[in-house]
Amino acid sequence: MCYGIQELKKRTFVEAAQKFGQTITTTIAAFIEEFHVSRDDAELSVNKYWKKV
């Protein structure tokens, strides 16, 4: 899959989780399951797209 599309999917996933009230911890766990990545990679991606309030 194209890198740009994959990054868009990841960003959308994180933004939706945050919008619907998920915690960053549960989002990381779901991200690992959805994208089949390591915990370190999931934490980097989630933190990259998580909007700090």
Image: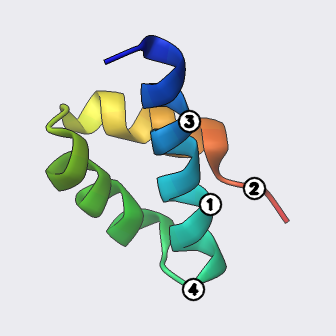
Q: Secondary structure at mark 1?
A: helix
Instruction: Give the mark nearer the N terminus: 4 vs 1.
Output: 1
Left/right placement of residue 6 relative to residue 50 reads left
Badge nearest the viewer, 2 or 1:
1
Residue 22: x and y, percent? 48, 79
Instruction: Give the mark nearer the N terminus: 3 vs 1.
Output: 3
Q: CA distance from mark 3 to mark 1?
A: 10 Å
Instruction: Give the mark nearer the N terminus: 3 vs 4.
Output: 3
Q: CA distance from mark 4 to mark 1?
A: 10 Å
Q: Nearer the viewer, residue 23 or 1?
A: 1
Compared to residue 22, the image places residue 43 above or below, namely above
Q: Assign the N terminus to one quadrant of the image.
A: top left
Q: Secondary structure at mark 3?
A: helix
The residue beneath circle 4 is 21
Compared to residue 17, the image places residue 1 above or below, namely above
Badge nearest the viewer, 3 or 2:
3
The residue beneath circle 1 is 15
Q: Amino acid at mark 4?
A: Gly
Q: Amino acid at mark 2?
A: Lys
Q: What residue is drawn where x is 56% and y is 52%?
A: 12
Question: Residue at the right extreme?
Answer: 53
Instruction: Give the mark nearer the N terminus: 3 vs 2.
Output: 3
Q: Secondary structure at mark 2?
A: loop
Residue 8 numbered tag: 3
Q: What residue is drawn where x is 42% and y is 28%?
A: 6
The 10 Å Cα crowd at callout 3, few under 14, some 14 to 19, many 20 or more, is few
Badge nearest the viewer, 3 or 1:
3
Q: CA distance from mark 2 to mark 1?
A: 8 Å
The residue beneath circle 2 is 51
Q: What residue is drawn where x is 23% and y is 41%?
A: 35
Q: Amino acid at mark 1?
A: Glu
